[in-house]
Amino acid sequence: MDPIRRSLLGQLARLSAGAALVPLSSVANAGINQQPPRREGDPTKRYGMLIDLRQCIGCQACTVSCHIENAAPLGSFRTTVAQYEVEHQETGEVATFMLPRLCNHCENPPCVPVCPVEATFQRQDGIVVVDSDRCVGCAYCVNACPYDARFINERTQTADKCTFCAHRLEAGLLPACVESCVGGARIIGDMRDPASQISRMISEHGDELMVLQPEKHTMPQVFYLGMDERFVTRPHAEPVALEVLDPHGKEMGYEFHH
Amino acid sequence: MNSTIELLAPRYDIAWYPWAVQYFFMIALSYATLWLAAPALVFGKQKWLPTARLALLACLATTLLAPVALLADLHQPLRFWHFYAYANTHSWMSVGSLILPLYVVGVIVLTWLAWRPALQANRQAPGIAGFISRWLSLGDSPTPPVLLVLVGLSTLVFSTGIMLYTGAEVAIVKARPLWNTVWLPPMFVATGFIAAAGLILLLNRVMGERCTVVSGQMLKVMLGACLVAGLVAGSWFLDGINADVGSVAAAMESVRGSAEWRSTALWGGLTGVALFGAVLYLLTRPAPRRPALYAWAWLLGLVALHVGWMFRWVVLMDVQTVARHSAGFHHYGIPAGSSGILGIVGTFGLWLAVILLIDLFVPWRQARQGGSATDVSPGHAVTQNAANTTEGVSSHG
Ligand code: SF4
Ligand code: SF4
Ligand code: SF4
């Protein structure tokens, strides 16, 4: 359809009976659904992560170490490394692109205001956590996170997600995924401290850094270096699902295969 | 980079289970039937009384069942009291958890007030029905109609809150572009009214009322609701056709990318148009032919219920299978257990049980806008209720 006709149709729609609804939507999103005040955590810090994709070899060491450290149930992950087979447009050369994913500890996290009991909250150091004693398991936050960073832990029946390994940070340790990363691709640190490695790398690489789905206005605080723009939003990929079964024929997981 | 193939991505389960569909369906039937009971019971329009009696029965049963389904969708149902201990105003779900009990209590009180004169008239009935009547009617003081009007009005206000919160709760989720549209809440309401009119058509038949006036009124409501639904769907489509992102764009992408979505869209469109056409046909027949044709309106009632339920299933379940962050769709098969088929069947079964119990023991057919026992012709009440009881017993035996 040509653009003029399209915009004419759009105008028509706005003129139609429901035009009155449009201002209502801003009430739904603004008045209600605003970020509650942050609580707990050190207000002098702001944790963030930088992932240097040039160093990632897709070994999944982070996936495994996080799984062990945080005792996630089989089949649920706080972090994974998505792998894509890409083909060069001209040369036809084939390569693999790796994309480690975890919670972005967004500056404007949509998962927080939706929580009906404030079990999900953002600490003053920016880390988004779940109080599993309070969580009612309504899964609203799981649906509200655009990054699939959350899941319902089938053992605790409450929401679960990456915590930047806050328990390790507090003990002066690095998160499990950072510690185990073979190429040193994951850098975590306090972005309010100008001397930290992450602050230095952010000022050094500035414009080259990218975040996932910036158009969602969540302001992710996990930055990617060496990212291809085409992977920032949902990639135009063709998955072929293949169910992975255990020896008893029970489904263990999914693999996209070509 | 020409083609990309996603080699490895974990499987993401859906987070809201079919219980959510049951809740959204039951609560929509509940608020819509309340509004269909309102003309007679709240605003005193006698012509609507037969409809109101059926609507009130449907409304009470769905109102009692909806919170059960809602609770079942929580992974920690025993912690429901956290909703009240940690209530807050920035979550639509929390706002909803505050409105819902007010609404449920409102409906229960309204129903009680409407049934009370008949319960009082029924106190001498033999057996359990009489016992229940004596116990439930709480004395024989008259029920002032103005009380019904007041309770009715406030419950209508709460029901608007329910419409608003159930819609907004889903529509604000930016992470699921298909949900994130202002047109979703009005569509929930419109399809809710379609289904509610259908339910009353069906009850009109299975409860043995077979009242032509009820059929005519419900067909008109259904026609109106279909028109509104069509208008909302059209506006949604035209409003979004300009944008590269958003609800319509996401829908187009899904329809393009999946044969299942294509057939769902086709089925939804065709059923909606067919329903609208059939209702229009029935309503435009010459008056003498109508009673014969209206006897079949319950079939349209079934179609209408299907439309209301399917819409919620597609919106709440199918949309969750659209991958947000990786490619394609996540497979979801309805599990057989209580979080799947058993849950769906169970909710409907429980609902039916509630209807049957009410029908056995409560003279719901004499619901009225307050008054006292003498307003209800006592002989009529007793015989009719006795007839119901024997009917129930014999069909059991
Ligand atoms: S990535 Fe998801 S879970 Fe993490 S803060 Fe952002 S919205 Fe919340
Ligand atoms: S699942 Fe738990 S943390 Fe998430 S929104 Fe519900 S109560 Fe809050
Ligand atoms: S920071 Fe900790 S919880 Fe988060 S992905 Fe790394 S290991 Fe897992």
Image (cartoon, rainbow, N blue to C red):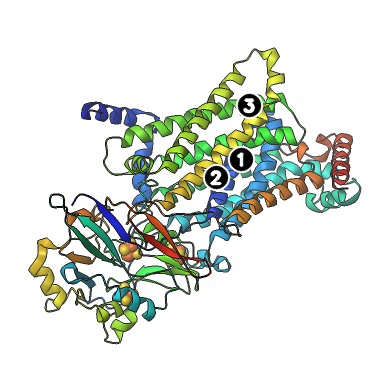
Residue that badge 2 annotates: B159
Residue A147 makes an appearance in the image: yes
Looking at numbered disc 1 in the image, what kind of residue is underneath it?
Answer: Leu
Verify CB contact (< 8 Å) between mark 1 and mark 2: yes
Looking at numbered disc 2 in the image, what kind of residue is underneath it?
Answer: Ser
Q: Residue furthest left?
A: A204
Label 3: which secondary element: helix
Q: Residue at x 81, y 46 (%)?
A: B360
Ligand 1 placement by image quarter: bottom left
Q: Quadrant of residue A24?
A: top left
Q: Position of residue A192 (x, y in %)?
A: 17, 74
Residue that badge 1 annotates: B34
Q: Position of residue A159 (x, y in %)?
A: 44, 68
Under 8 Å from ligand 2: the CB of mark 1?
A: no
Under 8 Å from ligand 2: the CB of mark 3?
A: no
Q: CA distance from mark 3 to mark 2?
A: 21 Å
Verify CB contact (< 8 Å) between mark 3 and mark 1: no
So how many labels did they put on this image? 3
Pinpoint the chain carrying mark 2. B
Label 1: which secondary element: helix
Task: Please state if B218 lies on the left or on the right of A100 as rendered.
Answer: right
Q: Callout 1 environment at 10 Å: few (<14), some (14 to 19), or many (20+)?
A: many
Between A137 and A1, the one nearer to me in the picture? A1
